[in-house]
Amino acid sequence: MSQEKFFSAQNLYKSFYSGTEKISVLQGLEFSISTGEMMAIVGASGSGKTTLLQILGTLDTPDSGKITFKGDNLTEMNDNELSSFRNKSVGFIFQFHHLLPEFSALENVMMPGLIAGKTKQEMEIPAKELLQQVELGQRIDHRVNQLSGGEQQRTALARALIMKPSLLLADEPTGNLDGRSGSMVFALIKELCRNLQLATIMVTHNSELAAQMDVSRTLKDGVFLEIQA
């Protein structure tokens, strides 16, 4: 496993206001992650796990602090630069699959490439190959409502990987699935991340899944507690 700490956060702060009350979510949080490394983020509901993941994926901004990717400071980039970063370098997978119901599994997986300006011909073969890898080769033409919950989430995983990102951000990706489907989705995430040398940051309430990752970090009072090997 490479030890290049290519993605890191330094001194992140984030607060919200409820009326006049200031609610501090992140308070000087810091971490770094290497290529090919899998990190779990656990913590109580309301601890800021999802807010952190959104900030790391540049879907939200910190009040202060710095996020770096391959030496570049993401917090200094403009909207167009951040949009390009998300499209080319980050794969997102959420608790709810967010697939487009009017399209087939294949079309959903192809979508990030089409949005990026690639042609259907360019995207079709890699999309089919990814669907084969997540064991949906026989379901590529099925629409979303024809897929089970586990199949939908595996389609979402293929979509997250279609642009060959180097960073995967996952927010409770097994939280809406039964135990068997959840285990299968996690096993596929782990296998693909190892094979592709993806850095993976996963928010999860599942302590058993967290224990299978390289590092498990607990978010409390806006900072990480000690690292658990």
Image (cartoon, rainbow, N blue to C red):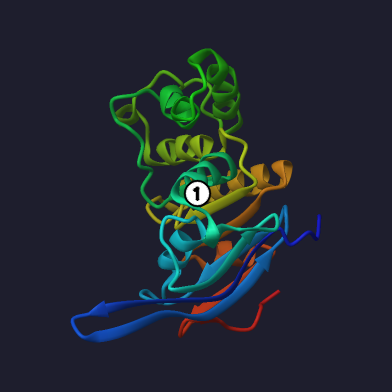
Coordinates of residue 40 in the picture (x, y in percent): 58, 65
Residue shown at the point (65%, 46%) measured from the top left: 166
Coordinates of residue 74 in the picture (x, y in percent): 56, 58
Coordinates of residue 177 in the picture (x, y in percent): 40, 50
Q: In this view, which residue lies farthest toward the right?
A: 2
Q: Describe the element under mark 1 as helix, strand or loop.
A: helix
* Quadrant in the picture for residue 15: bottom left
Q: In this view, which residue lies farthest toward the left?
A: 19
Q: Is residue 196 left or right of residue 200?
A: right
Q: Nearer the viewer, residue 52 or 180?
A: 52
Residue shown at the point (72%, 42%) measured from the top left: 195
Quadrant for the C terminus in the image = bottom right
Q: Nearer the viewer, residue 161 or 209?
A: 161
Quadrant for the N terminus in the image = bottom right
Q: Is residue 167 left or right of residue 152?
A: right
Relative to 130, residue 180 above or below = below
Relative to 41, residue 1 above or below = above
Q: Nearer the viewer, residue 145 or 166?
A: 166
Residue shown at the point (44%, 59%) measured from the top left: 54
According to the picture, the residue beneath numbered tag 1 turns out to be: 82
Relative to 27, residue 163 above or below = above
Q: In this view, which residue lies farthest toward the top?
A: 121
| Amino acid type of the residue tagged 1 in the rendering | Leu
Residue shown at the point (70%, 41%) measured from the top left: 196
Q: Nearer the viewer, residue 225 or 74?
A: 74
Q: Dot 1, crowdedness within 10 Å: few (<14), some or many (≥20)?
A: some
